[in-house]
Image (cartoon, rainbow, N blue to C red):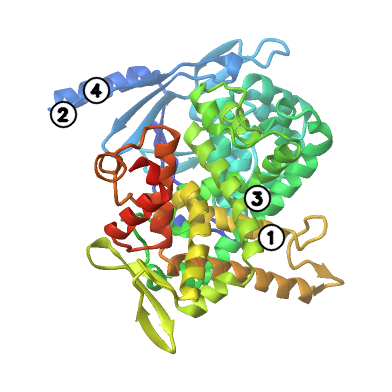
Amino acid sequence: LRLTYKKRSKSRKTLTKSLVDEDNVKPVDIDIALDDMLGREFAELMNEWLSNNGMDTVGIGMVMKNPEKSKHLETATMKVGKFWIDFVNLRAEEYAGDSRIPDLMRIGTAEEDAYRRDLTINSLFYNINTGKVEDMTGKGFQDLRRGIITTPLPPLTTLLDDPLRVLRSVRFAARLRFSMDEALRDAARNNLVREALSMKVSRERVGSEVDLMMRSPDPVGAMRLLVNLNLASTVFPLEKLMSDATETSNELFANGISLLSIAHDHLCDCKDEAPVWCTPQAISGMISNGASDSMLINDERTRKILWYAAFLKPLHDESCQSGLSADTENIGRRQGKKSANRSNVMKMIVDELKRPIRDAEVVSQIQKTADHFSILIESVGDESINVLFSGARVSNGNLGIPSCTMISDGKITIINTDNETNSDWNKAMEYRLTCAQILLGVGSQWRAALILSLSEKILSLTENHEIVNKTENGVITLKNMEMHKQIVAQYDAFAASLLQLGLIGIWDQKPIIDGDELKRTVLKKLPFGPDFRQVMNEQIEWMTLHPGGSKSALIFHIKSKFPDHI
């Protein structure tokens, strides 16, 4: 009995920035390799032992072998305590002629099994009988120390045995921030590997590997490796979505990496030195309606979604420029998973990578909202600065009713929003309404959308989408650096104004007057349908312009606006 413990190794020190706290990453699962029986047989013996010792048995999941799809072993899976455990027999194979599919597969020795594994660093076994880690290939310890990703057998042999291994190699390089061996790189670029990856590996397995890359400490490095190894077009098959994919794919991938790199680097900078709008002091008391607003540096799932949105943003833009609407996701969802009405980004994520529809919808929403933010920030100019200097503030008051204040003649003045006539306040509220209309669509993902918009603005500074702060004759371009700082300051001011105006959480704002009460006591002649929706939208708009406004003032406004329905 030998055990492979798949704990995420602590990476070597590196200059690569990371948002993942690797010291606190927990073990994923435990692999137990068996030298005298199949995994299913051992799992059944495990349940027998649990029962005999007065403990509950657990369900056994089976992953059946399928050599045609490069799944050569039957695996039994069960949860024991807090861990998922995979039981699988040690593997040895014999081949007939030039076939890549084994003619005979049998329970092998640990050494035979080790050489059939994907990477040398994954071929280490912990012998539970001796309490020692065994390196059967003689390369695993050395490659761990050197920070090298390579294979036990000649790389082409290993990759063709299971083509998914080429993606696992990329993922482990990104996760551990190791370098790929040059021979492995050459094999990864082989046409036979790309063909086998396309023909033999299910899209679900491909999508799972991509998802793990996006969750790794270095998603930028992972995507860059896919492009440099000529694997990107196989993993992200643009030709299925675009008629001119051959001409545009390289540019789309290059732009996606540039945008992803900027977004990732900016978040890493925010982790090192948080802007004002990301500090607990600024956020305290400014989130309304009981909404949650987690920081991206602490939210692994939203960060992963942002990486997808950044890398696939050029595809979104290209589709929009080609006249393919990106606003069809909800239609697609109603009409089923295979709907032709989906945007290209939705099709890529759901149909090609087999990721959840919900994830794809959030990615698309972040991309669209980033565009809206970009247009808004460009159009309002210094309005966010004016709001900040005016001191116009909407904060949480007693009983959840917003408290509104403003600085006037150097003093803090309480604002009665029912009938306030101060032009600076009313201008701030018009700005509040404009921002709210965007936030209502994106909700709690607003930070991801804003970072994506910021990244696109920074990217626009560069020529040919090179890295920001490029060098000319070894000297950093000071003009680019200064413009970069100005853009970041502009976006920081915009985000701070959203907080100051109490807009974070507005997507969870409930109407003061619900539909039943509206029809029963306010507009008794109001029919359901478009007119009803118009009135409810008017109510939300009024509440946004008059935070903390009274119910009586709202009723007066509604009746004045829609006298025909009284």
Q: Amino acid at mark 2?
A: Met
Kindly identify which residue carries mark 3: 221
The residue identified by callout 4 is 47
Position of residue 333 relative to residue 152, above or below, is above
State the CA–CA distance, disc 4 to disc 3.
43 Å
Q: Nearer the viewer, mark 4 or mark 3?
A: 3
Quarter containing the N terminus: top left
Q: CA distance from mark 2 to mark 4?
A: 9 Å
Mark 1 falls on what kind of element?
helix
Mark 1 and mark 4: span between their CA atoms? 58 Å
Q: Nearer the viewer, residue 541 or 274?
A: 541
For the C terminus, give its image quadrant: top left
N-terminal label among 3 and 2: 2
Residue 29: which quarter of the image?
top left
At label 1, the amino acid type is Lys
Q: Residue 55 bears which disc, if any?
A: 2
Mark 2: few/some/many CA within 10 Å (<14, 14-19, 20+)? few
- Residue 293 in sight here: no
Q: Secondary structure at mark 3?
A: helix
Q: Look at the picture and state if 279 lies above or below 186.
A: below
Residue 224 x/y as whole percent: 70, 47
Circle nearer the viewer, 1 or 4? 1
34 and 513: which one is in front? Answer: 513
- In screen coordinates, is 226 left or right of 333? right
Seen in the image, is 276 located left or right of residue 138?
Answer: left
Mark 1 or mark 3, earlier in chain = 3
- Among numbered discs 2 and 4, the one appearing first in the sequence: 4
Which is more foreground, mark 1 or mark 2? 1
